Amino acid sequence: MRTEKARKNIIGYIFSSPFLIFTLVMWLYPFIWGLIISFKKWNLISPSQPWVGLQNYIKVIKDPMLWIMIRNSVYFMLVFISLTTATSLLVALLIKQIPRFKGLFITGFLLAYVSSGVAYSMVFNLLFSGDGMINNFLANFNIKIGWFTNPKIAMASIGLIVCWKFTGYYALFFLSGLNNISESLYEAAKIDGANAWQRFIKITVPMLNPTFVMITVFATITSFNLFTEPFMITGGGPMDATRTMMLEIYNRVFSLLQAGYGSTLAIVSGIITFIFVWVLRQIIERDDIYE
Amino acid sequence: MNKLKKYKLPIIYFLLFVGLLFSLFPYIWMVLSSFKVSEEIYTQFIPTKLTFDNYSFLFSGGSGQQRNFLYGIVNSLIVSVIPTISVIFFGVLTAYAFRRLKIMGYKIYENFIIYQMLFPGVLFLVPLFLLMRDWGVINTYTAMILRYLIDPWAIFIYTQFFKTIPESLLESARIDGASEFQIIFKIMLPLSKTTTAIVALFTFMARWSDFLWPLIVNKEYGKMPLSVLLALFTKGGYQQYPGVQMAGATLLTLPIVILFIVFRKYFAKGINFTGLKG
């Protein structure tokens, strides 16, 4: 029995060695390296990489751009989370009630989700452009909106198009959350005389809490990792209104060759994401859902 | 009350239908625009005359530059298919070692994988680029592919599935003289068709649409995947060709849309695991 265990152990380690080596080389090593670079001043090319201690971190925190980017991301989160929660919950509630063609509608709404970032950014860039389809339509009502050119609303517009992408995807999560709510809860509430709205607020919303938490966490991570959409559409403008951490890291490291500063920004961005996720979970997550 | 009930279902179907139209509108517009002449893109929703010029422009290599979109498609396939196969292979192999062979410390490894998945990818961008540069593989397929060959997420979902396979099945195979390697590929892999379909679908889609990493590690037009080629094409002085842009966007979107429609039933099954995918 002992030899059998040893045999399995040896074979098992042979099988998992590619993963273990890969993790050491492509994960742990770069992770530590990234930490080290963040304490150095380095332009990616020069052999001299002097240690500068916390200087990069102090620079990042003192840089007004950091706060602009946080503001942009929070703005995006507010628009994106509220819009997407509303649209996807609505879609899920509607799909839940239909007896036929459920799969067809789910597939239809999910098509947006599989579109690639570059492609749909290009499509919306043209649709929302100054003389694009949407503005041409709005011209009938004498409205013209600078979707991506007005600094006040550019980030909200990006929130809108990312909402387009994620509605079907999040609806699927809401749908599975809705399917987990026992029908007997609704029956009992009906007997107690609760109307449809009361049932929604007192049963559906609290029972969907885990889904809300999950979606908020995804959305937070999405908003801090936003890159393709602003890169393709606005390039971070107008007036830095759509500049995100990811975009800034890309610019700093690969255009300005500030490897140290960029690495520091990456770490700060990771920490900020973590803090936001943690705080939002404290606010939203409920342990005491009805048993 | 009864009257309301009678109309309830048709109203719901109607609302869903309108919602779906909104959701599909950008796709419809994209495909239609790719066949339009330039003047009609902003003014006409339905084109009055169809043209294939936009597509032929893309495939002719665009005004003499080495930007052939046919290469782009081939490159996209290379950087998508190789990681997909590799992720499945190493996913099965590693998950089997953890979950079925229960190697020493497997619980630690399994927990570690979950932490790995939750780790923000942004931390690895710069050092991984430097690693690729030190290895001298910048501007090669290797640089675009290497970091994606093994995916902890795939190992995770295979371990979840392997939990459900009874040990007696494996024992009887061992008594029949099957090697562990044979057990994996003759028993475990065929049993986990659904899991494999999920891994394949999500990995392929993620790689096909990947943008930032191939943008950073490869500057040669001949090796660029479609997403990068198209993005640089759009930003690099071709803004005045919206029809060509939409033809390119259609080329980039169509393969994954078809793939998704074919494998749609696995998508819903995989969704519970995708949350953890970074």
Image (cartoon, coloured by chain):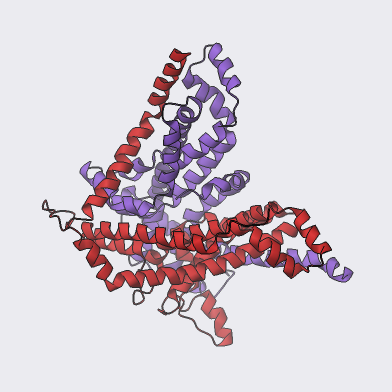
Chain colours: A red, B purple
Query: Residue B246 placed where, x, y %?
Result: 47, 63
Residue at left offset 55%, top offset 84%:
A139
Taking depth in this image into account, of A155 and B251 the one nearest to the observer is A155
Q: B78 or A218: which is nearer to us?
A: A218
- Among the 4 quarters of the image, the one containing residue B79: top left
Task: Looking at this view, name the residue that lies furthest to the left.
Answer: A48
Q: Residue placed at 49% from the left, 58% from the top?
A: A217
Picture residue at 40% right of the left edge, 29% below the top: A16
Picture layout, residue A77 above or below residue B64: below
Is B35 in front, or is A192?
A: A192
A182 sits left or right of B259 in the view: right
Query: x and y percent of residue B252 in the render?
Result: 47, 54
| Residue that appears at 54% across and 45% down | B273
Give the quadrant of the N terminus of chain B.
bottom right
Instruction: State the image coordinates of residue A285 (x, y, percent, origin top left).
Output: 55, 59
Left or right: where B106 falls relative to A103: left
